[in-house]
Amino acid sequence: MSESSGVTLAVLGCGTMASAILAGLLDADVVRPDGVVATAASQASRERIRSQLGVRVCDDNAAACAGAKVVLLGVKPHLALPVLREARLGPDTVLVSIAAGVPTTALHQARQAGPVVRVMPNTPASVGRGVFIVSPARGAEQAADEVAATLERVGDVVQVPEHLHDAATAVSGSGPAYIFLVAEAMMDAAVGLGVPRAQASELVIGTLSGSAELLRQGQHPAALRNQVTSPGGTTAAALDELEAHGLRTAFFRAMQACCDKARSMGDRFE
């Protein structure tokens, strides 16, 4: 999505997640600030977007979409269809929706004609390390491939059929919050054991970052865990406590709840 190719991007509802995506695209020089128009409901939000991202802003969704080749729909799910009808997209405009739970069938009906691609990002996109779930509407497979190729510039892309979109959202869309909660718990525990807060933070962040890099090398998590765990040792004692308190069950139930919530949000559009 480079301005030199004549492609412009409109972001309708430039909130936290849409801003994260846009920040990643701008940092990777996928789009230029003068090739982007973003909308937000409040003047304060528009000023924040203009100041932080350097893009054009307005409060008129239809005006923002005029001439745009790609439209990123970032509004809250309950506003997605009204905003989309207001925007009046042309048949050649690619619609990329990050509205959780809103199915492509409803999006397609609201825009009437043209390709629809459903995407679930996560906030690490703002630092070029996002994970994007991409699911095309029927007939929009080519558009989905183009969207995926663009998003690969700012993170990892996993294409899944739409019936798996909500389950995948429970993994990576909400996943950063799980990791941040784990990081917070580890930092607090370290402080409770007497480690100063600054050093606790440094230890936890470095440990999580390094562990992620080991996972990227392709070994199974169980194999990596076994490399750290000596029989009868300190790590084994810690893992026994985590298992005794139902860590695996807690994660499964949490992700099931996330998936169920996303599906229930989509049921209203059936």
Image: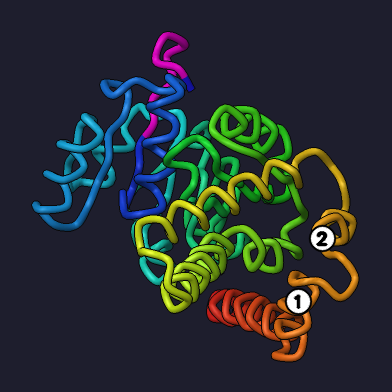
Q: Which of the two discs, 1 and 2, labels the residue nearer the N terminus? A: 2
Residue drawn where x is 86% and y is 65% of the image: 230
Q: Residues within 10 Å of mark 2 (few under 14, many from 20)?
A: some
Instruction: Answer yes or no: is residue 270 visible.
Output: no
The residue that label 1 is drawn on is 239
Instruction: Answer yes or no: is residue 62 visible.
Output: yes
Residue 66 lies within the magenta run: no
- Across and down, in percent, residue 170 comes to 64, 68
Residue 6 lies within the magenta run: yes
Residue 110 horizontal side relative to residue 51, left or right: right
The residue that label 2 is drawn on is 225
Q: Amino acid at mark 1?
A: Leu
Q: Amino acid at mark 2?
A: Arg
Residue 73 horizontal side relative to residue 225, left or right: left
Task: Report the quarter where the C terminus lies.
Answer: bottom right
- Across and down, in percent, residue 183 comes to 51, 65
Foreground residue, 64 or 171? 171
Q: Residues within 10 Å of mark 1 (few under 14, many from 20)?
A: some
Magenta stretch? 2-9
Residue drawn where x is 19% and y is 57% of the image: 41
Element under disc 1: helix
